[in-house]
Amino acid sequence: MKKTLILLTLLPSAALAHTGHDSGSFATGFGHPFSGADHMLAMVALGLLAAQVGGRALWALPLAFVGAMLVGGLMGAAEMPFPAVEPTILASCIILGALVAMAVRLPLPLLLAGTAIFGAAHGWAHGAEGPASGLAVYAAGFAVATAALHGLGIVSGKAIPALAIRGAGFVAALAGVTLAVAG
């Protein structure tokens, strides 16, 4: 896994930047996570992982992601550096998808740490590409959309058979690899 992360940092910047957000509105922020496959894949995969792990992970993983994403958003808006942010976003798709596909049961603290890193990277991208004014309202929009995507993953993960969940994880990981290679 360590080698995979190192290799991903060497890939081209392929996290599909989504620029052009002029106004700091809730609707613009809400729409941002839906503007790129990288964001949607990772957020739904995290919801699937939370459903698969169950217990405290059902609320702790999404909460860690959204909380770290908001902090990352502030960092991005403040133009603070986040080395390898785009490869980290792509890695989130691949790794979260692979964890779901393999039904890996890592300790919750380790999952929370990884989730926070991935959330911060996604948030940094949202904040860096966000509006010059109205950032708080825009951030509220992308936080609600992210929570909704996590919820979609959780509901799906509770409604479909375990094999289908694993298949969805495989699709997410494969799509992440495709985005990385295509970039």
Image (cartoon, rainbow, N blue to C red):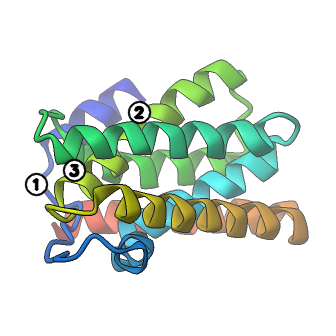
Quadrant that contains the N terminus: top left
Quarter occupied by residue 47: bottom right
> Can you say which quadrant of the picture contains the C terminus?
bottom left
Q: Residue at x 42, y 80 (%)?
A: 27
Position of residue 169 in the picture relative to residue 39 (left or right): right
Which of the two discs, 1 and 3, sits closer to the camera?
Answer: 3
Labels 2 and 1: the sequence-earlier one: 1
Q: On residue 12, which mark appears?
A: 1
| Mark 2 to mark 3 CA distance (whole Å) | 12 Å
* Frontmost residue, 106 versus 113: 113
Q: Which mark is residue 34?
A: none
The answer to whether the residue labelled 1 contacts the one labelled 3, judged by CB atoms less than 8 Å apart, is no
Q: Is residue 119 left or right of residue 25?
A: right
Instruction: Return the residue at label 2.
Output: 117
Name the amino acid, label 1: Pro
Which secondary structure, mark 1? loop
Cα distance between the residues tagged 1 and 3: 9 Å
Nearer to me, 158 or 78: 78
Give the residue type at disc 2.
Ile
Horizontal side, residue 161 vs residue 39: left or right: right
Going from N to C along the chain, the mark reached first, 2 or 3, is 3
Residue at image point 14% right, 61% down? 132
Please state which of the two labelled residues, at mark 2 or mark 1, is closer to the viewer.
2
Q: First in sequence: mark 1 or mark 3?
A: 1
Question: In which image quadrant can residue 29 be found?
Answer: bottom left
What amino acid type should be assigned to the residue bearing mark 3?
Answer: Glu
Q: Position of residue 86 (x, y in %)?
A: 21, 50
Q: Which residue is mark 3?
A: 86
- Residue at (65% x, 40% y) in the render: 61
Using residue 25 as the reference point, say whether residue 155 is left or right of it: right
Q: Residues within 10 Å of mark 3 (few under 14, many from 20)?
A: many
Q: How many marks?
A: 3
